[in-house]
Amino acid sequence: MLTMSIERLNIREPDDVVRVRQAVRARATEVGLGLVDQTKIVTAASELARNTLDYGGGGQVAVEILNTGGRKGVRLTFEDQGPGIADVEQALLDGYTTGGGLGLGLSGAKRLSNEFEIHSEPGKGTRVMIARWK
Amino acid sequence: MDRIPILKLGSALLVTIQVELHDSLASALQDDLANSIVAHGAKGVLIDISGLDLVDSFMGRTLGMIASVSRVLDADTVVVGMRPAVAITLVELGLSLTGVKTALNIERGMALIRPADDTVSADADDEH
């Protein structure tokens, strides 16, 4: 798997969520994802970026264009040094929220993506990776 | 701070969301709509989202809250103009938008809102 390009964005304030969406939209277009697939990954990115901001105390995202055997994709890795998630299984349940949201961010991002990985431990921050392939 | 304009359209109020709704803008919109529903005796709120290329759970929550507050104030909420890609993504995301009606366009949206003069009239049934 080859990383064709990688772009890192800070997520420190609400406007950054917009910037992340725009960057993901641009990369998804470059890769040639159809409109629905683009919308899915940008929406997933919006959910995860908001999580990074609201729960992670801010962080960053790495936006990569991948190419494996001619098949292109977009991979996003959100990382924060926030409190971390004690029970990841619970966090992945629809409707579970610790912040008054709808509790769809993590589970939704997982449903909207071809690949999803999460690593989180209390006191060690959180890292969420999603990927969408053409 | 910029606020989203609310237009009066017959017995309904029309709001067009085209910009990113951050927390304070969403709050201001909810407040302004509640005040306008009461001030104009509006029977419905039409929210035009035809300009949105995505609806995430934050927007979904905002729409749901607007619908709930409107309901309490005896008004219907209709979201109009949802793009196909947004609809597909929204369903997969798991957003149910309960309490929120949807319509393809403003005209159809207006038809979903009860008319302003929809009151029980004893005189109409009386026969003299």
Image (cartoon, coloured by chain):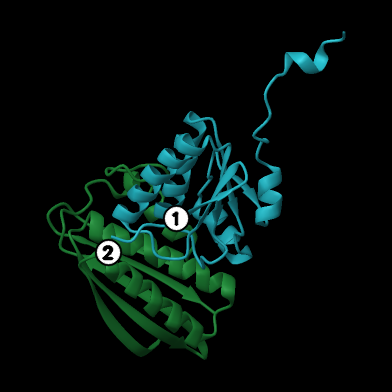
Q: Which x, y percent locates residue A117?
A: 35, 64
Crowding around mark 2 (Cα neighbors within 10 Å: few <14, some 14 to 19, many 20+) is: some
Are marks 2 and 1 in one subunit?
Answer: yes
Q: Residue at x 35, y 90 (%)?
A: A5
Q: Earlier in the sequence, mark 2 or mark 1?
A: 2
Position of B119 relative to A75 (above/below): above
Colour given to chain B in the rendered image: cyan
Label 1 secondary element? helix
Mark number displayed over residue A14? 2
Horizontally, is A108 left or right of A58 in the view? Answer: right
* Quarter occupied by residue A45: bottom left
Q: Nearer the viewer, residue A11 or B109?
A: B109
**Label 2 to label 1: alpha-carbon separation:** 20 Å
Q: Is residue A8 visible?
A: yes
Q: Mark 1 — residue?
A: A108
Identify residue type, mark 1.
Answer: Gly
Q: Residue at x 55, y 38 (%)?
A: B42
Label 2 secondary element? helix
Mark number displayed over residue B62? none
Q: Nearer the viewer, residue B127 or A35?
A: B127
Position of B120 relative to B31 (above/below): above
Identify residue type, mark 2.
Answer: Pro
Colour given to chain A in the rendered image: green
Chain letter, disc 1 residue: A
Q: Nearer the viewer, mark 2 or mark 1?
A: 2
Q: Which x, y percent locates residue A123?
A: 12, 54
Q: Residue at x 57, y 40 (%)?
A: B44
